[in-house]
Image (cartoon, rainbow, N blue to C red):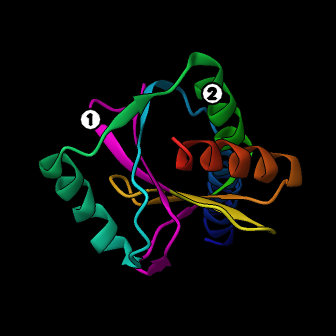
Amino acid sequence: MICKAFIIAQLMFFSCAESQTQEKMHDVQISNARIYLYSGNKGFTTAGAYSHFDDMIKSGTKTKQLADIDIKSIQTILNKAEQKKHWQTKVGINITFCEISFKEIDTLSKVILRTGKEKTIITDLTRNIDYIITDSEDISWLLAFTNGFKTE
């Protein structure tokens, strides 16, 4: 009886340890991405940002296809980022709207970028995943990247 309990406890421990290791290893692969050339200063919740994609499509907001080098850079940044489940929240103003086609899913993901000085959060609104970026070089690159589209 004690032996069975010990074996079950070991199996539970190893399965938990294995799942934690898997969560830290990311293999984000992007096949395609475009950015919306939206320059509004309206604040959003994540639900509002999600529905704003439909508004931009209806109003004919221009988009720009991302270059392969930018896609590779974003892919590398996402692979290094901490991933967390996204919960409904206010996302504020000055967000960048993108649509990204991830190779592991069949649908186009609605994604928003919120850049800050100490961290940047990239939220996949379709799959409810937050990618938290804290590396200063990655934050600087993303800030320059998003600011480049605000002048177009």
What whole-number distance in Å separates the C-alpha atoms at marks 1 and 2? 20 Å
Judge from the rendering whether residue 17 lies leftward or rightward of residue 152; answer left or right.
right
Q: Earlier in the sequence, mark 1 or mark 2?
A: 2
Judge from the rendering whether residue 136 lies leftward or rightward of residue 3; answer left or right.
right
> What stretch of residues is rendered in magenta?
84-112
**Residue under circle 2?**
70
In the rendered structure, find residue 107 and report the number of the disc placed on it.
1
Crowd rating for badge 1 (residues with CA inside 10 Å; few <14, some 14–19, many 20+): few
User: Image height check: is 48 above or below 16?
Assistant: below
The mark tally for this picture is 2
Q: Amino acid at mark 2?
A: Asp
Query: Which residue: 18% across, 46% down?
Result: 57
Query: Which residue: 18% across, 58% down?
Result: 55
User: Image height check: is 104 above or below 39?
Assistant: above
Query: Which residue: 39% across, 53% down?
Result: 38
Residue that protrudes farthest toward the top in the picture? 68
Crowd rating for badge 2 (residues with CA inside 10 Å; few <14, some 14–19, many 20+): few
- Image coords of residue 127 (percent x, y): 37, 53
